[in-house]
Image (cartoon, rainbow, N blue to C red):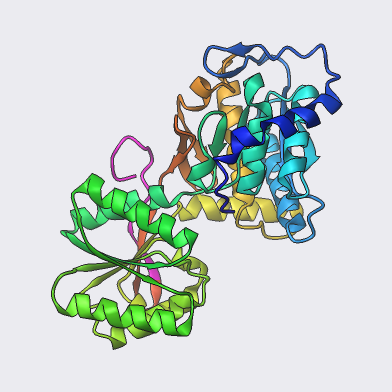
Amino acid sequence: MFAFLSPLRKALRPAVLGLAALGLSACDVNLAPNRGGGPAIDTSQPIPVALLVPKSDAGAAPVAAALENAARLAIAEQGARIDLRVYDTAGRPELGSAQAQKAVDDGARIILGPLFGEVANAAGLAVADEGVNVLGFSNNASIAGGNVFILGPTFANTAQRLMAHAKRQGKSRILILHSNDVPGQFGKTAIEQAATTHGVQVVGAQSYALSVEGVSAAAQAAGQVVQSGAADTVFITTDATNAAMPMLLRQLPENGVSPAQVQYVGLTRWDVRPDLFQLPGAEGAWFALPEKARQDSFNQRYSAAYGAAPHPLAGLAYDGIAAIAALAKQGRGDALSTRGLTSASFTGTGGVFRLMNDGTNRRALAVATVRNKQMVILDPAPSSLSSAGF
């Protein structure tokens, strides 16, 4: 879902305009933007919402189906009148921009999706001049801003939540372990920014190649830092599903990074890999996750409606519809404007969330740990985002 294409938005504009010219037919659509940045709506009428998903992309088609299912489940449960129209992006930026323009020409007042960051970027560019906002499913903050919002959970949000918890627990000296790829660099930056916010010192950052040799060398280097007394916390950026994670959780303790003396913190959700809990470095580690009761409830309702468990990303579509519905039910003509979308918090599949003016989001997260090889919630997800420890 990562795509680092923000500099291309202006460069792509001529091509997008050419594609848009192919489908200008809905002359009766009033897209006059309101002052809040987005087209005004009549909340007494069904709200036209476009869902852009990669239905014909063989690799992503199951995700596309789950996103559409979740959006329709949200419409049924949220009680707002929404006219959902689905457009296939095939997972390609050029088609995403064309379909975004077609959706607006067909009357869409807001776009939900696309799935991939580069496609959401292109879609946002295509309709920016018409003031239509895009709620993309990406978690890549580099594409957020202007008329593009991202619904995916961000490294920055998670890092802030965990760093606030670490500060309250007296942790003050952080060593960052990060892969030497783009996600690893983004994770490192998010941790550094969170440390600055909360007055925690970053004593070092150890990168590693995603290889046996790279992970082994990083574990040895981290052991030297910890044994010198410089760090009281090791913050790991690697995704729990990556093969490097179990290697780190074995090799770090072998190199003197004892979980009994040093706090392990994971930037990603370790609960998606409960087998990790069996490893030496996992005991006592911290990681963040959405409100489990709400997530479980959504999973159960989705399974009852569609006969199968939802894809892990399906809840993002539900959340987008929930936000639109909540504002529409207030009778707000500016519900789909930037001002409307950023005016309130919403309750989604994993708890409370909020869209920010910079196009990113904040999500209420719980802090969990591992005790006796089982996940335990240390600090529940807050019911609001009014405090710093979101």
**Closer to us: 151 or 292:** 151
One can see residue 257 in this view: no
What is the residue that sits farthest to the bottom in this orientation?
A: 254
One can see residue 274 in this view: yes
What is the residue that sits farthest to the left in this orientation?
A: 229
- Counting from the top left corner in percent of width and height, residue 264 is at 30, 70
Asked if 326 appears above or below 41 in the picture, the reply is below
- Residue lying at 45% horizontally and 27% vertically, measured from the top left: 344
**Closer to us: 59 or 290:** 59
**Closer to us: 313 or 74:** 313
Determine whether, in the image, residue 80 is placed left or right of residue 178.
right
- Counting from the top left corner in percent of width and height, residue 196 is at 24, 48
Determine whether, in the image, residue 140 is placed left or right of residue 40.
left
- Residue lying at 79% horizontally and 39% vertically, measured from the top left: 87
- Residue lying at 15% horizontally and 59% vertically, measured from the top left: 170
In which quadrant of the rendered image does the C terminus lie?
Answer: top left
- Residue lying at 85% horizontally and 27% vertically, measured from the top left: 22
- Counting from the top left corner in percent of width and height, residue 58 is at 79, 59
Q: Does the magenta stretch include residue 227?
A: no
* Magenta highlight range: 375-390
Q: Does the magenta stretch include residue 379?
A: yes
Determine whether, in the image, residue 12 is placed left or right of residue 191.
right
